Amino acid sequence: YQRRVHGDFSMAWLGLVLLAAAALPTCAQTGQVETSVVLASILTGYDASTRPNLEYNIPVFVGVELRVNHLYNIDSKLNTYVLDAFVRLTWVDERLHFNSTWRNEIRVDPTLVWRPDVITYNCIDTKTSAETLTVQPSGTVFWSRQLLLTLSTALDLHDFPFDSQNLDVIFMSFSYDATDFILGVFNNSRGFDPDPVATYNSPIWTMGYTNFVRSNTTLRSTEAPHSTVRLIFNLTRRNQSYIVKYILPLAFLVLLSQLSYWIDPMSPPARVGSSFTLVLAVVTFNVTIGAELPKLNYLTLMDWYVITCFLFAFLSVVEYAAVNHFMYKPTPEGKVIGRHIDSFFKYTAGGDMG
């Protein structure tokens, strides 16, 4: 009798285990079946060519969110930079509302539903490496794409190399104007998640802050304005390299040009050789610095600094030319004038050491 009871108990446990094992694929199949049923129900009769809220004549609100992976290749000559980021757009399409007890969201083929034609207005080149589109039971749609963008931006180089720049990412709709389509930011007052100020790292730039500006842009005078969101990166240039490589060496060249006043005016090769060498050195620095910048119709702060250094170096050449002219005159007055000129520049350069 005990063996029989023990055998029945073992068989009961074995049955429960087999039942649980059979239920696992059944649950997974149930989820797949429900997803297929939901997709079939919401996409039946769905017109992907018309925007949400069209029948109510209400504009659709589309939120923009940016997750920055990398920001690099900021080119001062071409006024461009490269941005690798996840761009997520979200909106509500009531036609995609569904009831589900199994899933909080379902993934949908992006080509099967309406998507906002949000373009990057200042983009030169775009590469899309991945995209997903999910729909929640409330009809809220999340469309995420990983984009590699080459963007144009207007750089203000007046204060170069002590400058700060605002790099723009301008989103707008091309097909819909502001009466049908409103762009804004989603779930974040800055439009970034996370804030790239804390994660950005570059040997040339430091990120000061990020911001967004929402406005309307008129493409044609005969059309209504288009809703626009402008996301801004504020970057400050790291100038230590420019100070060490350019500013300090030029300052030392100016000091050397002042030392030429202490060379005996009766030694033309020494004075002429040193003065012209310093002038050419300053010109070489100017060419080197100009190679890093675009052709501008204004002078940068570095340009003014180089010009000032050039004038000091060139002044040593002009001074010796005047001294030589008067000192080699046959009259005693000429030699006196030449000596006075040379003495004046000695005192100006740092006092009489003789």
Image (cartoon, rainbow, N blue to C red):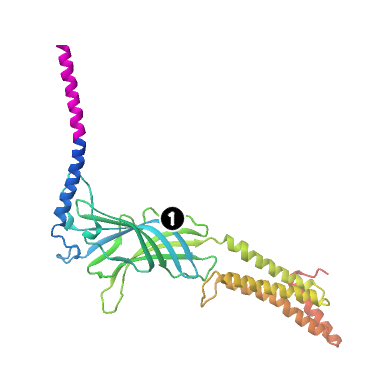
Q: Quadrant of the N terminus?
A: top left
Q: Quadrant of the C terminus?
A: bottom right
Asked if 273 appears above or below 11 in the picture, the reply is below
Residue drawn 77% across the image and 73% down it = 261
- Residue type indicated by callout 1: Val
Q: Is residue 205 visible?
A: yes
Q: Which residues are magenta?
A: 1-22
Which residue position holds label 1?
197
Q: Is residue 248 left or right of residue 260?
A: left
Q: Is residue 314 left or right of residue 290?
A: right
Locate residue 43: give its quadrant. bottom left
Residue drawn 62% across the image and 63% down it = 245
Locate residue 48: give its quadrant. bottom left
Q: Nearer the viewer, residue 37 or 196?
A: 37
- Picture coordinates of residue 113 (x, y %)? 21, 59
Locate residue 148: give its quadrant. bottom left
Asked if 218 appears above or below 53 in the picture, the reply is below
- Picture coordinates of residue 24 (x, y %)? 21, 36
Q: Nearer the viewer, residue 213 or 246?
A: 246
Asked if 304 appears above or below 164 in the picture, the reply is below
Q: Main secondary structure of the magenta part?
A: helix
- Picture coordinates of residue 26 (x, y %)? 18, 39
Residue drawn 17% across the image and 46% down it = 33
- Picture coordinates of residue 94 (x, y %)? 17, 57
Circle 1 packing at 10 Å, graded few (<14), some (14-19), many (20+), is: some
Residue drawn 15% across the image and 19% down it = 8
Residue 120 magenta-drawn? no
